[in-house]
Amino acid sequence: MRKTVLIIIGMLLLFMPSLFSGHLSLYVAPWAASPSLVDSTGTHAQLGISYAAAPRLELEAFMVMRLTPDPFSHMKAALAISLPLATDLFMHDGKAPLYYNAYATLGYMMTVKGAPSHTLFLRLTPLSLGGPYYGTRERSLVFALLYDLTNKAFSLSCNLFMFDYYFK
């Protein structure tokens, strides 16, 4: 049974990029948050995927993981919905959208490994250059307000930069 499931997942992964061509991206970023949300010691990274489901809607799934001093000792997973504020993510007629964009994102994050927490967040990205049409995107000065439902506390997070690579 397990072997069959792995074969099916492998087949889907082979054919999925063609289904999402041009609108699916893999991204990486450093991640920092208030000490009330995470153990503030060490370096954390964010690794995720985003999919431009519609010209004005992007779906995201990402992991935040601790890299130092003990790698992967703290991990969080999140799902989010982003709305572009300046222009469409892509045009149906194949024309190039505006190179600049800004985003407002609403999401949910939970602990996978480490102290349990469930968090809602609102993230603002004031500066984003590129997108699906261009093949890459750089997001800068990304700030989020997080509300930890477990501890009933607010905190902040920031990503100074995020790099996206779109699959073509």
Image: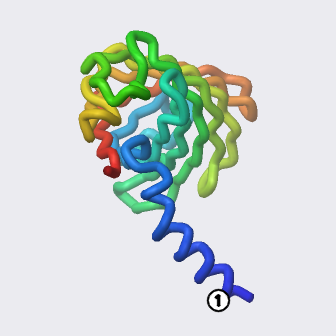
Asked whether 116 or 55 is in front, the reply is 55
Count of labels in the image: 1
Q: Residue at x 47, y 49 (%)?
A: 20
- Residue 111 visible, this angle: yes
Q: Badge 1 local density, few (<14 within 10 Å), some, or many (20+)?
A: few
Q: Which residue is mark 1?
A: 3
Decide which of 162, 87 is in the foreground and name it. Answer: 87
Which residue sits at x=35%, y=55%? 68
Q: Is residue 44 visible?
A: no
> Residue 21 versus residue 57: which sits nearer the camera?
21
At 51% from the left and 21% from the top, the residue drawn is 56
Give the position of the N terminus as an image quadrant.
Answer: bottom right
Q: In the visual, does 45 lie left or right of 55?
A: left
Q: In what element is the residue under mark 1?
A: helix
Residue 116 drawn at (x, y percent): 69, 47
- 52 displayed left or right of 141: right
